[in-house]
Amino acid sequence: MNENPTPTRGRPKTLDRDQILQTALMAYWSSGPTNISISDICSMTGASKPGVYREFGSDDGLKKSVLETYHDLAVQPLIDILERDQSTDETTDALIGFMTQDREQLGIPQGCLFVMMRAHVQHFGPSTCEALQDVRCDLFGAYETWIERSKSHGEFADIPTDIAALFIDAQHGGAMRMQREGVPNDTIASVLGTAFRVLVSNERSGARIN
Amino acid sequence: MNENPTPTRGRPKTLDRDQILQTALMAYWSSGPTNISISDICSMTGASKPGVYREFGSDDGLKKSVLETYHDLAVQPLIDILERDQSTDETTDALIGFMTQDREQLGIPQGCLFVMMRAHVQHFGPSTCEALQDVRCDLFGAYETWIERSKSHGEFADIPTDIAALFIDAQHGGAMRMQREGVPNDTIASVLGTAFRVLVSNERSGARIN
DNA sequence: TTCTTAATGTAACTAGAGGTACGAAAAAGC
DNA sequence: GCTTTTTCGTACCTCTAGTTACATTAAGAA
């Protein structure tokens, strides 16, 4: 709304918003969003506590902003896969590949911050919960349009769209939890492969029923 | 080890261990295990803080004991279903029925304390983590023996046992999370029904291969 | 130079967590 | 009745979380 576009007067700003967001993001992601305090983030970034509060308003505000950053960073790529114009099989393979990347090699923490935060809703304030809902809606929207598109190509099993979306979400959540618990990525990939088998239309593997 | 079997001397004990365990169990279950403090439990039960500490040693000790209680109360029934001598279809139906019971009607909180606690490991001490591992092992053991038994009856799909166990565990976790998030039970049952379809041997719906 | 504006960070505050020191209380034994 | 044993609970401690009051600093404008 009232973004100050380079205010000419007054002491210049030194607080690095992005640095704080990035640092908080990685800390929440690797140590759990409820195990990192504002003070932790301050000592990690060198920012002062009032500085952080001036920028984000509250713990709730910071978490909300971090979640939005995470959306762009890690949820959107998943949505992008769903929006790519390829066969259902290719998409499920891409999804599995995305979820079971070698995180250590990429310098990215295990699991998914969004999934973790959903399991900790009870600890968050209203803004964060709202942001959580927003991400959930985005993701489910992408699941559902992908499912509908696959269905229109006759490449999807006879499962109601909302049920299928919940199913995929459950697999994603399960995979991310397994990764956090230390299950090897190829094992997770096997589980996902097994799961996603129900999604593809079974007309191709046998007799055509309809 | 040194259980005092009715010590004759000294002031008689008034602290009700079971009441504390039951109260803590329900509080953790409905509000989340990391949202209930020792003080909360004290004011709910009327016990004093030192009393609780004398009985359980620490927060960690209490959580561990509560988890053991939860095992007997809510995990064992699930294991019992797996150990019943019935067809694979009957068992999956029973599992789905068990997971999607109307909790409000039963006066039981939504979701599963074990699943919740797994998502919060970072907050727990060593004893609780150990207990968590124990429950996990028990459950996976039950999954795997059931899977093996179903396979020996030719009623199970061609999926490695460990993968299938992880798959079932993921569905369970997903169902419990959905329930917590307010998804209706019959919707959850549909998702589970879709998921468990991959488990049954597909030899019955077509040509026998072996 | 002084005034105004807008940012800065030290040093506090409050609330609640886990945890405990210690004296009082209630029973059995002598 | 006095001692011993065992448990009891009030009142504290420490630590850390989130949060803020307020004096200070750095710039442009007058």
Image (tube, coloured by chain):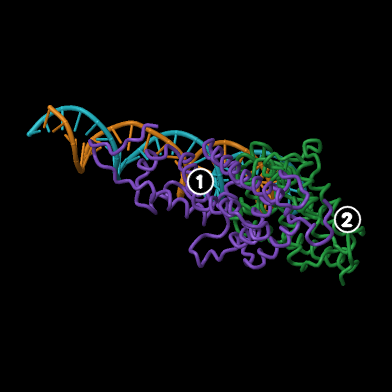
Chain colours: A green, B purple, C orange, D cyan
Image mark 2: chain: A
Pick out the residue farthest to the bottom.
Answer: A210
Q: Position of residue A126 (x, y in %)?
A: 61, 59
Q: Which mark is residue A89?
A: 2
The image shows residue A107 at horizontal and vertical percentages of 78, 37
Label 2 to label 1, Cα distance in Å?
A: 41 Å
Q: Is residue A84 left or right of residue B169?
A: right
* Residue B156, image x, y percentages: 73, 53
- Amino acid type at mark 1: Leu
Q: Is residue A15 visible?
A: no
Relative to A102, residue A144 above or below: below
Q: Count of labels shown?
A: 2
Decide if residue B176 is on the left or right side of residue B203.
left
Residue at the (60%, 54%) spot, across then down: B85
**Kind of residue sitting beneath label 2:** Asp
Q: Secondary structure at mark 2?
A: helix
Q: Is residue A102 above or below residue A192?
A: above
Residue at image point 63% right, 52% down: A119
Give whichever of A74, A131 is nearer the camera: A74
Q: Up-down: is A156 above or below B165?
A: below
- The quadrant of the picture occupied by the C terminus of chain A is bottom right
Tell me where residue B2 sits by quadrant.
top left
Question: Looking at the picture, how far across and down is residue A81, in whole percent?
Answer: 86, 55
* Label 1: element kind: helix
What residue did someone put label 1 on? B67
Name the chain under label 1.
B
Question: Tags 2 and 1 in contact by the CB under 8 Å rule?
Answer: no
